Image (tube, helix red, strand yellow):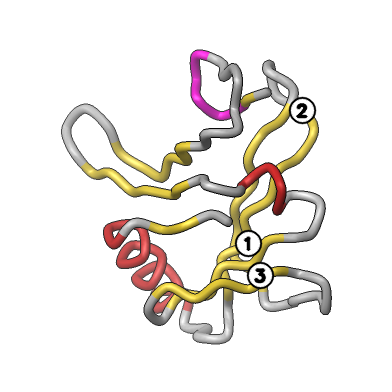
Amino acid sequence: MITLTETATTKVAQLIEAEGAGELALRVAVKSGGCSGFSYDMYFDSEIAPDDEVLTFGAVRVVVDPASAPMLVGASLDYKDSLTEAGFSISNPNATRSCGCGKSFS
């Protein structure tokens, strides 16, 4: 299943704290679409379905729906904040091809 780097965990925890809603979890999903066939979707969610997979990294909960879970096995979420690169990125060994923007894959 997907893992979070320490940097990503810290940034997600900061964002949840800024929302002022400690019950929020980070939902990571794979949706149809994008220029390569699938795209990643990430957002804070307070609703967790009984069949969702829930992972914990420090104080951060990550929720993945059953349809997305197989496509995220072995994937890693990282956060970078530098002069040349800023934001979250997913490294996914299941992706055989990705687009130039890095937001979609197949």
Q: SS of the residue at dot 2?
A: loop
Residue highlighted by disc 2: 33
- Mark 3 or 1, closer to the camera: 1
Labelled pair 3, 2 in contact (Cβ < 8 Å): no
Ranked by sequence position, the earlier of labels 3 and 1 is 1
Q: SS of the residue at dot 3?
A: strand
Most foreground residue, 94 or 47: 94
Crowding at dot 2, Cα within 10 Å, few <14 / some 14-19 / many 20+, comes out as: few
Please, what is the three-letter code of the amino acid marked with disc 1? Arg
Residue 45 numbered mark, or none: 3
Please give the name of the residue rendered at 59% of the width and 28% of the height, measured from the top-left corner. Answer: 95
Measure how far apart labels 2 and 1 are at the Cα level: 18 Å
On the picture, is 28 further left or further right than 66? left
Instruction: Please identify the quadrant where the C terminus is shown.
Output: top right
Residue 69 at x, y percent in the picture: 70, 53
Q: Residue furthest left?
A: 83
Give the magenta-colored segment's residue range: 100-104
Measure how far apart labels 3 and 2 are at the Cα level: 21 Å
Ranked by sequence position, the earlier of labels 2 and 1 is 1
Please give the name of the residue rendered at 67% of the width and 33% of the height, measured from the top-left corner. Answer: 39
Image quarter of residue 52? bottom right
Labelled pair 3, 1 in contact (Cβ < 8 Å): yes
Please, what is the three-letter code of the amino acid marked with disc 3? Asp
